[in-house]
Image (cartoon, grey):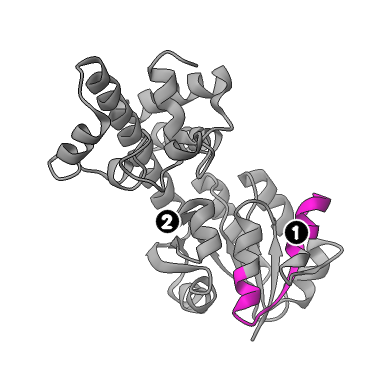
Amino acid sequence: MSTIAFIGLGNMGGPMAANLVKSGHEVLGVDLVAELREAAQAGGVKIAASAAEAAAQADVVVTMLPAGRHVLGVWGELTPKAGALWIDSSTIDVDSARKAHKLAQDKGALSIDAPVSGGVGGAKAGTLTFMCGGSEAAFAAAKPVLERMGKRIVHCGAAGAGQAAKICNNMILGATMIATCEAFVLGEKLGLSHQALYDVASTSSGQSWSLSSYCPVPGPVPASPANNGYKPGFAAALMLKDLKLAQEAALASGANTPLGAAAAQLYALFNAGGGAGADFSGIIEFLRGRG
């Protein structure tokens, strides 16, 4: 099994690194936060002193970081082993993703942008979806590694295409969640029970993932965050980040995305009102006028 450097051991990166360990890889972990390093170490990750030290020993480098500037900063510091593969699973802007690919190319490393969908639960269960951008050769090299952390690995196209797919997907998710929440708020006003509306919409033309898998009211879908006080899953702050990235891309490309823009504005208000740490489905409380 190959040696993998994993840089960024947070809510997503920590479980992903642990799954690589479980599959037999030696994983060298790096994070600035001591508690995250300790948690990863308990899961079998060996802690390296720095990203540069870990990358120098690794056949594969995986980064899971907050923003494009962090990815570019880290990749700029790394010196790859001969034939190394660099995978970025952060969700970042398309332009930064393409710059990261250029950095890797200039240093002689294969590279792929591979943001994920599936949330913390998917990271722990190893059922993430990876949306990949990069060359055919890089994708072929990355796929066996990504399969240790996810169940669906999709090659979306050239450099940056994975990030493009991620922000388009999450713009759909943000907008459909708001529409789903609005329907339940309206149903409450009209005297419909949550279960009745769910039973109709989930088997009719109103069906969506936001409804059937992540229903924003308690009861119909027991595993949804609505049944656990809207503890995330996928935090509203992260949804806002992705919606902003989508709007930046829409502006740069000239795409018309009025519903995406409205979703970004509503999530900005929800975050500003104290909802940033709640699950993104908790925006139903904001729509009810409760915060």
Residue ID for mark 1: 39
Q: Nearer the viewer, residue 72 or 9?
A: 9
Residue type at tag 1: Ala
Is 148 rendered above or below residue 71?
below
Q: In the image, is residue 36 part of the stretch drawn in magenta? A: yes
The image position of residue 70, as x and y in percent, is 69, 47
Q: Quadrant of residue 179?
A: top left
Q: Residue furthest bottom?
A: 1
Q: Nearer the viewer, residue 78 or 273?
A: 273
Secondary structure under the numbered disc 1 in the rendered image: helix
Secondary structure under the numbered disc 2 in the rendered image: helix
Question: Position of 53 compared to 182: left or right?
Answer: right
Q: In the image, is residue 97 part of the stretch drawn in magenta? A: no
In percent of the image, x 44 and y 39: which residue is there?
Answer: 227
Is 112 rendered above or below residue 263?
below
User: Which is more foreground, mark 1 or mark 2?
Assistant: 1
The image position of residue 105, as x and y in percent, is 61, 67
In percent of the image, x 59 and y 53: which residue is there?
Answer: 99
Residue type at tag 2: Ala
The numbered dot on residue 161 is: 2
In percent of the image, x 54 and y 32: which residue is there?
Answer: 278
Q: Is residue 115 visible to the viewer in this orientation of the structure?
A: no
Magenta range: 19-40
